[in-house]
Each structure stands twice: as C-alpha cells, then as structure tokens.
Amino acid sequence: MKNTPFTQKHIGLGAKMAEFAGYNMPISYTGINDEHHTVRRAAGVFDVSHMGEFILKGENALDLIQRVTSNDASKLAAGKAQYSCLPNNEGGIVDDLLVYCIEENKVYMLVVNASNIEKDWNWIQQHNDKKVEMHNISDDTCLLAVQGPNATKILQPLTDMDIMNLKYYTFVKGEFAGVKNVLVSATGYTGAGGVEIYFEDKDGNADKIWNAIFELGAPQGLKPIGLAARDTLRLEMGFCLYGNDIDDTTSPLEAGLGWITKLNKEAFTSREIFQQQKVEGVKRKLVGFEMVDKGIPRHHYEICDKDGKQIGFVTSGTQSPSLNKAIGMGYVAMEHSAIDSPIFIKVRDKLLQAKVVKIPFA
C-alpha cells in the first residue's frame, strides 16, 4: 500500500485505516455520523492526496482535452474549472475528472480518480498525436479538501488570496500558510461548501499546512474526516462515484450527466453514440431512491418491480445521517424512473419497498 504525506498523522490521531485505491487511507476517526454532521454544520478536513493530477501544456493542449473529454473546455478562462468525463470508444466512461485552466489555451491541470491514474494517463497519451507536453504530478502533489459552511472563514487568515468569495468552480493561486505556489479551488464533493488545497509535497509543506490549518481551526470545531463520511456526504448530494455509479459500461446520458456531454462541440470520443442516445432516448436511467421498508440498500443489490422481476441494480446506498433514512442510487429501466415510482430492493431474497425521489436528497 502507498502512503500519503499525512498517513502518520491519521494513525497518530487514531483513525481507522484501510486500503483504498492502493493507498493506506483513513476511513473514520470518531465515527461516520459524527464526522458527517461536523462537515454539514461546521468544517472538516479530508486528506485526498491519493487523487491523480496531470499537467497538459502547449499550443495543442486544449485540442487534446477537447478530443478526449465530453464537456467543452474551450469555455474555460484562466482561474476556472470544469467537471467532465473521459468517454471510451463504446459510449462508456473511462473516468470522471476535473479540468482546471491554468493558462488559457496553453496550460491545464486534470484531476482524476486515484484508482484510474495509470488507466487515464495511458488513455490520454494514446490520443496525444500532436506532441502535447504531459506531466504526471500525482506523486508530488498533496491535496486537502476542507469542507463545510465554516471552512473558508476558518482558512482565510492563512492567506492573502480571497478564498471567502471564491465562486463555485473557480480557483486562485498564491501563498497559503507561508507556502508558495498553492492552488485553492472551490469544486466541492460534499455539497457543504469549502475549498480544495493543492500544493507540492516538498520542504515539509505537508506538515506546515496541516499544522497551520488545525492550529487555527481546531478551536473552531474543525476536525479530520475519513473517507466513509465523504461517501455519505456525496451520496446525499447525488454525486456520482466512479466504480459505483459510473464506469466503463455506463453512458453519461444514462447517469444524468448529459449536462457535461456537449454534443455541439467538435468531434470527441463516442460523440456519435451519445448523439444517437439523445435522439432515441436511453433504455435505463440512474435514479435516486429512498427506502419505504426498513433496510439498507447496498452496491449491486437487485432492483425489482412488484412481481420480483429485475429492472435494475443499486450502485450506491447508505443510511443518510442528515435525513435519518436509508437512501440509494441505482440504474432502472426508463419506465420505472419517474419520481414516486415504487421499486423494490432485493435484500437476502426479500423484496423491500422503496420509491424513486429527486436528487439531491438533502
């Protein structure tokens, strides 16, 4: 297992550790519910240094990004970011990612999922026929996500950058906690507000920034948060998790990601397949649901109609700490996807009733 620069800190704080995407990661500290409520009500710090970062440079950098991603990166000015995905050749998804425009038309940073770093790098490299300069800076980059309604207020004294007024999907670069060349963005994966802090793993930067954040934040209720609460927080917002809700076999149009699939831009991977799906409609759809009967839906459980015939499968499920009820997401046949449609989750050969609801849940 790989470690992040913060692994020893997590262990020292008594975190429950486990393998995630090849890394030794903190799953929880004080318990999922406590950590979840901390982020919703105050602020929490996630170590997400396992994520992958690529720099793409040169006059053809934008052209390459446009050909391999579904969203329209030509709309990005310097200081703006965008959610997108890398479609494969069959209409599925290689990965979902963030595209940061560092310098318009010339320098971009792509942030990808930890489990897909090598796969994504190879996929983009395979399409790099115009000699775009590519750098995989994943192993040299630290990433802390400080999330929650009080996050920016707590962090603002550590920098001259105006992070309290940072608009959603924008970023700034500058000095933070005495460390130069820090990128602070507001892309959030919890729905609770806050920022992400990217910086180089060198010269003791990791200790410096972690210690500064907690010295200032701990008296204000800031706590370290594990990946388990990150999952419940993102699920309440209906945000997709790669490997669960989207993968190589799911189309962005099926997953409700038509808004990041810009069919009016020039050719990109699988564009023709998505155009056809747009015209003909998709046969299944990713929906949110809440349990009517008692029980917790889990990844891969069957979704059935009232007669017990399978109509889909659960992709994510949990007991929602904010709502105090069991919720989930899953793919169902289109005729069962309308809001309030009754569906049944198969749990140990029992059919438990649920109903389709709007996303986000909370």
Image (cartoon, rainbow, N blue to C red):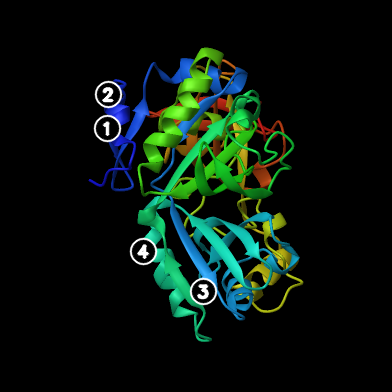
| Residue lying farthest to the bottom in this orientation | 130
> Residue at horizontal 56%, vertical 23%?
43
Up-down relation of residue 59 to residue 256 (above or below): below
User: Can residue 357 be seen here?
Assistant: yes
Horizontal and vertical percent position of residue 334: 66, 49
Quadrant housing the N terminus: top left
Q: Nearer the viewer, residue 184 or 18?
A: 184
Of the image marks 3 and 4, the number of the one nearer the N terminus? 3
Residue occupying image coordinates x 62% and y 29%? 157
Q: Position of residue 251 (x, y in %)?
A: 58, 60
Give whichever of discs 4 and 2 has the lower sequence position: 2
Q: Are marks 2 and 1 in contact (CB under 8 Å)?
A: yes
Report, in whole angstroms, how far the alpha carbon at label 3 lies from the one at label 2: 45 Å
Label 3: few (<14), some (14–19) or many (≥20) C-alpha neighbours in 10 Å: some
Label 1 – label 3 distance at C-alpha = 41 Å
- Residue 8: give its label: 1
Asked if the residues shown at circle 3 and circle 2 are in contact, with their CB atoms under 8 angstroms apart, the answer is no
Of pointers 1 and 3, the one earlier in the residue sequence: 1
Quarter location, residue 279: bottom right
Within 10 angstroms of label 4, few (less than 14), some, or many (20 or more) residues? few
Give the residue drawn at x 27%, y 43%. 3
Residue sitting nearer the eye, 230 or 45: 45
Q: CA distance from mark 4 to mark 1?
A: 26 Å
Of tags 4 and 2, the one toward the viewer is 2
Image point 37% across, 35% down: which residue?
Answer: 207
Q: Amino acid at mark 3?
A: Asn
User: Which label was assigned to residue 118?
Assistant: 4
